[in-house]
Structure formats: C-alpha cells, structure tokens
Amino acid sequence: MAKKSLEPFLWTLFSAGGVLAALLIPIHLFLFGLAVPLGWAHPSYEHLLSLLRHPATQGYFFVLCTLALFHSAHRFRYTLYDGLQIKHLNEVINVLCYGGAIVGSVWTVYLLWRIP
Amino acid sequence: MNQTPIYTEFHPRWYRRRTSTYWWLRRPSYLAFILRELSSLFVAWFVIFTLVQIQALSQGAEGYQRFQDWSKQPVVLIVNLIALFFVVFHAITWFKLAPQAMVIRLHGKRVPAAWIAGSNYVVWALASALVAWIILGG
C-alpha cells in the first residue's frame, strides 16, 4: 500500500502526466486512431520509422507513455475509491493500478530499446 | 453474535448513512465528474495503442501494414473515436482547473482566470500543430 509520504510524489506524476496527456494525446489519437485509418492522411512507413529511430522521439515517447500511465493509474485508483466505495480493497487496487503503470513503463522501455 | 468486533480504520463506531453506489447519476455535475475520472481508462488505451504501433513499426513494412489493417476495423475505429472524446474532455476540464491551481500575479494583481485558461488553449493548439507537422510533413 502506498504510504502517506508517497502521496505527494504520486500526485506530481499524476499532475505532470495530466498536462502532457491534455496537450499531446488528442492530436496523436486523432491522427493515428482516425485520420490515417480513414485515409485522410498518408504518412509513409519509412518516414515514421526514421522519426522513431531518432533519440529525441524515443525520449518523447518514454516521457509521454510513462507519465500518462502514472496519471491514469492515480486517477483510476481514486475513481474506484470514490465511485464504487470499495475501500476494503485499497491494497489490491493500489498494487493493480501502480503495478500496471510500472509494467507498462518497462514495456515502453523494452519496445523503444529494440527499435531496429 | 458472539464474535469479537473487527476494527477498521474507517470509523465504524459512528453512524453513517450509506451513500448509494450510483450517487454519480443524481446530478449532471456528478456525472461530468465521473466521466472526467473515467478518461483515465482511455489515456491508458492510448498508451497501449501507441506501444502496439511502435512494436509494429519495428517489425518492418509488413508488420506495420498488419497494424494499419487492424486499426481500420470498425471496432477499433469506434474505440478510438470514444477515446478521442474522453481525452478531449480531459484536456478541457484540465485547462479549466488550471487557473485555480496556478495563481499568477502581475504588478500585485491576480492575472484573470480567463487569460490563464486562454493561454493553455493557445499552447494546446501550438503543440497539436507541431506534432501534426512532424508526423505528416515529410
């Protein structure tokens, strides 16, 4: 279970992730979730791969993905806490939320590390 | 009825009226709150979608083609459309709260909330344009 002293740190991650999620996720989702599949835009495979090979892009995705995951974990934890009134499951919820964010961050590092 | 009472940290000794599990359906503002909170699920979906895309890009042109075919499926398109609605809702509510979190003073006077919220929207537009330009321009 997260101790009281960890709370400010987790809130900082939540807050930083919230800013990045607000500024950057809508355009990413619009482009790759709608515009490209619906044929409104055609970025080539070679162009996207060369972008992804750039260390700046990899740093960008590392920061965006990990902070977005910790933002999401923190907020979802409180959604369960407020919305469903299942306080007796606090410890399980903490482990699942922050554990999920940690697993996702490790996955992000692994995927960025093995880009050809 | 002979059991030893179990003490928890949640003040069991006080009488508390139990709130309905569906309290958030009672008022539009409660519903907006819970919708805003649920945006966290779609932020997580975005990360998973992006990681799958990065993996596909690493697997060569054929792997990326498979990802593109998958992302054209109606189910995936609808999930992404719903996710876009939720992340935009997150962004708007986040920028709306920003003036309350940041108190900026100029010449001893508090900068109006509308200016702070407005500058957030300008930064949002610039960031979106920059990302779109990098991804599409080339």
Image: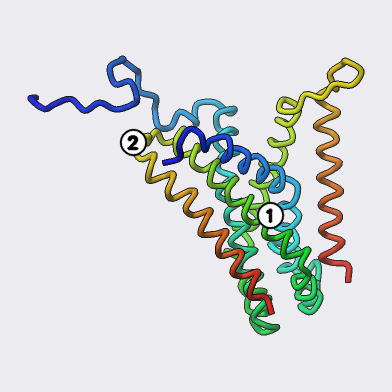
Name the residue type under label 2. Answer: His
Q: Amino acid at mark 1?
A: Leu
Nearer to us in this view, B137 or A13? A13
Circle 2 sits in a helix, a strand or a loop, which is it?
helix
Residue at numbered disc 1:
A64
Picture quadrant where residue A91 is located: top left
Whether B31 is drawn above or below A44: the answer is above
Image quadrant where residue B29 sits: top right
Q: Quadrant of the C terminus of chain A?
A: bottom right
Q: In the rendering, at what x and y percent does residue A89 appear?
A: 35, 40
Q: Which residue is mark 2?
A: A88
Q: Nearer the viewer, residue A100 or B41?
A: A100
Mark found first going from the N terminus, 1 or 2:
1
Classify 10 Å Cα crowding around label 2: few (below 14), some (14-19), many (20 and above): few
Residue lying at the far right of the rendered structure: B107
Q: Picture coordinates of residue A64 (x, y %)?
A: 68, 54
Of all chains, the one bearing label 1 is A
Q: Chain of mark 2?
A: A
Residue at image position (68%, 83%) is B60
Tell me if B109 is positioned left or right of B64 in this view: right
Residue occupying image coordinates x 39% and y 27%: B20
Residue with the most extreme front position: A5
Q: Secondary structure at mark 1?
A: helix
